[in-house]
Image (cartoon, rainbow, N blue to C red):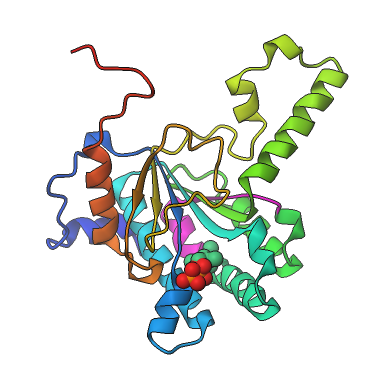
Amino acid sequence: MMWLKAWKQNKENSLDQIALERLPRHVAIIMDGNGRWAKKRGLPRSMGHRAGVEALRKIVKTCSNLGIKVLTVYAFSTENWSRPKDEVGVLMTLLTEYLRKELQELHHNNVVIRAIGGISALPSEAQKELENSIKRTQNNTGLILNIALNYGGRSEIIDAVKKISNEVLNQKQKIEDINEKCISDALFTKGLPDPDLMIRTSGEMRLSNFLLWQLAYTEIVVTEELWPDFGEKSLLNAIKAYQQRDRRFGGIHTD
Ligand code: FPP
């Protein structure tokens, strides 16, 4: 299915008050609250995660239709390994299933699939599916769907420090030339713009080790909705809130 055509034909889509020329280029999301969503309904946590995948499918579609360049989603953190083995298994299976089921449609809609984090520690099935999806979509030119898996901001920075130290040791890098770009380029997100908007669902006011370097000047919107309830309208509201912010990047306005 071609998403954009169907979306444009649906008269119910209201883009009122959204300035399409000032969209965030990069949206990052902490998809929190799957467990609470399930608990509220007396369902097992796995059903909450399943509903979370459905929410993700819709948000990917909306971001693509809007023309947003990059969507980074926090699917599994380095800390999530401490959850019960069954739940870790469910999350990995859902990832594999998602890629298997959605790849065709994502590819058809010009989406580029990417991943950040310690991918080599994922179960081999998930890795295989991920590698296949990345390879298949690498030449697409639409939305970059960047999935954070076994991702931790601190461990990403540690890796970057090691990489740069090695370059210094091998005389490929001078200490006095180390700058922000050099550090950005040593992170998993190399080549991507920093997020303009970071959304966290479920009301929690934490970064939880997500994109620590990249979020330095990002506008943060926290919504009370649980992730499975977060839909197209919720995203548009977050974008509206973002567009009402006064981004100064540490400076002041002179007008
Ligand atoms: C937080 O909810 C959510 C996660 C730890 C995982 C997010 C994963 C998905 C939305 C689905 C899998 C992803 C892909 C890419 C297919 P929580 O379990 O911490 O909720 P709680 O705080 O209410 O318990």
The structure residue drawn at horizontal position 67% and vertical position 31%, both measured from the top left corner, is 186
Q: Residue 82: x, y in percent?
A: 69, 68
Magenta stretch encompasses residue 156: no
The structure residue drawn at horizontal position 60% and vertical position 34%, both measured from the top left corner, is 190
User: Which of 31/137 is in front?
Assistant: 31
Magenta stretch encompasses residue 113: yes
Against 220, residue 202 (above or below) is: below
Which span of residues is magenta-colored? 102-118
The structure residue drawn at horizontal position 55% and vertical position 54%, both measured from the top left corner, is 147
User: Which of 125/26 is in front?
Assistant: 26
Against 74, residue 227 (above or below) is: below
Q: Quadrant of residue 21?
A: top left
- The number of numbered discs placed on residues in the rendered structure image is 0
Q: Residue 202: x, y in percent?
A: 38, 64
Give the residue furthest to the bottom: 42
Give the residue furthest to the right: 170
Quadrant of the image for the C terminus?
Answer: top left
Q: Residue 53: x, y in percent?
A: 46, 70
The structure residue drawn at horizontal position 49% and vertical position 54%, both measured from the top left corner, is 73
User: Which of 79/235 is in front?
Assistant: 79
